[in-house]
């Protein structure tokens, strides 16, 4: 067991190291001069040289990489050019929107997927099963940004139940207003993940229903409902929980598009604005 944990930790460290190299190299290969983009087309050569020195662009790439990694290992992040603020502070502020959004979307995903997956498994090859699988296929096919636009048209434009975008803040608008502003983005994020988890839940439940202990439980006189909720579900949750853990990370990365559709000041919008402003320090720190 200790050897296994040690191998996993070593693999984790090597993965982070490889990721840091890829992130740094990709940003280095971007065309154009970051100092020129920041200062504009009318900037003089002297001002561009001064900005390059401020950004450290006049140093060799290897030195910049080592300085970046060394700072992160010491808990020091870079200074955003656009905001003149440490990237760690920017990320902490934006995570106050992105993390609640991901948690809300995950809650919707789990509630819907477990209910639909168990129902589909209990109705195998019947109309209910076919209907749920058809809906899940549609959920997999729908782009989340397109679904977000449809949700805005229906609930914000026509029904006027919620605002079309923006975030009032947790202190300014209150918790209820904040959650209300995140409901539509969470629904758009949860659609694809619900479709995936529904299929995984259905398959896991069906596989467990074929086990010998299920037949034994039925032979003891337990009803199908008692067996399903009391015995099958607990054993079928192992692969479901594994997928749920992976999905939570996917929800945070998928928020980049959704936050821009709903104009939410989260991590996704931060990195989008950083790319537009050529603020590469923010981009690489957020990705890492």
Image (tube, rainbow, N blue to C red):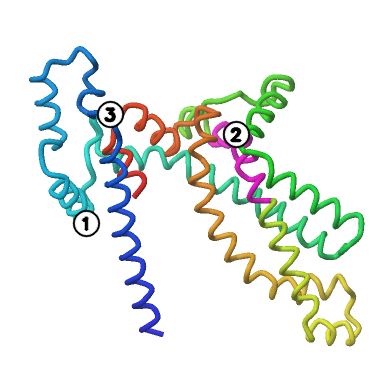
Upstream in sequence: badge 3 or badge 1: 1
N-terminal-most mark, 1 or 2: 1
Q: Mark 3 points at which residue?
A: 83
Q: Residues within 10 Å of mark 1 (few under 14, many from 20)?
A: few
Residue depicted at x 13% and y 37% = 56
Measured along the vertical axis of the image, is residue 64 above or below residue 277?
below
Q: How crowded is mark 2: few (under 14 residues within 10 Å), some or many (20 or more)?
A: many
- The CA span between labels 1 and 2 is 36 Å
Name of the residue lying farthest toward the top: 42
**Residue at (72%, 52%) from the top-left corner?**
112
Q: Quadrant of residue 17?
A: bottom left
Instruction: Say whether marks 1 and 2 touch (CB < 8 Å).
Output: no
Q: Residue at x 85, y 57 (%)?
A: 129
From the top left corner, tell me how far across and down residue 145 is, in percent: 60, 34
* Residue 200 place in picture, x, y as percent: 69, 62
Q: In this view, does 47 lie to the left or right of 270?
A: left
Magenta-drawn stretch, dominant element (helix, strand or loop): helix
Q: Give the range drawn in magenta.
A: 175-194
- Tell me, yes or no, whether the highlighted magenta stretch contains residue 193: yes
Q: Report helix, strand or loop for mark 3.
A: loop
Distance from the alpha carbon under mark 3 to that under mark 2: 28 Å
Q: Mark 2 points at which residue?
A: 145
Residue 279 sits in quarter: top left
* Residue 242 % position (x, y): 57, 66
- Circle 2 — which element? helix
């Amino acid at each position: 067991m200790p050897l296994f944990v040690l191998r996993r930790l070593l693999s984790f460290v090597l993965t982070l190291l490889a990721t840091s190299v890829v992130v740094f190299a990709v940003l280095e290969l971007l065309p154009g001069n970051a100092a020129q983009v920041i200062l504009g087309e009318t900037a003089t050569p002297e001002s561009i040289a001064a900005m390059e020195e401020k950004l450290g662009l006049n140093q060799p790439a290897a030195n910049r990489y080592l300085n970046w990694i060394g700072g992160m290992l010491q808990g020091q992040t870079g200074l955003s050019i656009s905001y003149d603020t440490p990237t760690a502070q920017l990320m902490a502020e934006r995570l106050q929107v992105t993390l609640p959004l991901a948690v809300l979307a995950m809650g919707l995903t789990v509630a819907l997927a477990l209910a639909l997956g168990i129902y589909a498994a209990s109705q195998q090859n019947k109309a209910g099963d076919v209907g749920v699988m058809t809906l899940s296929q549609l959920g997999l096919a729908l782009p989340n940004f397109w679904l977000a636009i449809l949700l805005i048209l229906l609930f914000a434009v026509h029904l006027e139940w919620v605002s079309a975008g923006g975030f009032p803040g947790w202190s300014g608008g209150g918790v209820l207003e904040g959650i209300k502003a995140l409901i539509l983005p969470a629904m758009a994020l949860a659609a694809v993940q619900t479709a995936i988890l529904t299929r995984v839940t259905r398959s896991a439940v069906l596989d467990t229903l074929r086990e010998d202990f299920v037949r034994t439980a039925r032979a003891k006189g337990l009803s199908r409902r008692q067996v399903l909720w009391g015995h099958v579900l607990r054993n079928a949750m192992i692969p479901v929980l594994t997928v749920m853990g992976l999905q939570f990370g996917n929800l945070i990365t998928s928020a980049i598009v959704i936050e821009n559709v709903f104009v939410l000041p989260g991590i996704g919008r931060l990195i989008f604005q950083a790319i537009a402003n050529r603020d590469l320090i923010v981009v690489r720190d957020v990705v890492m």
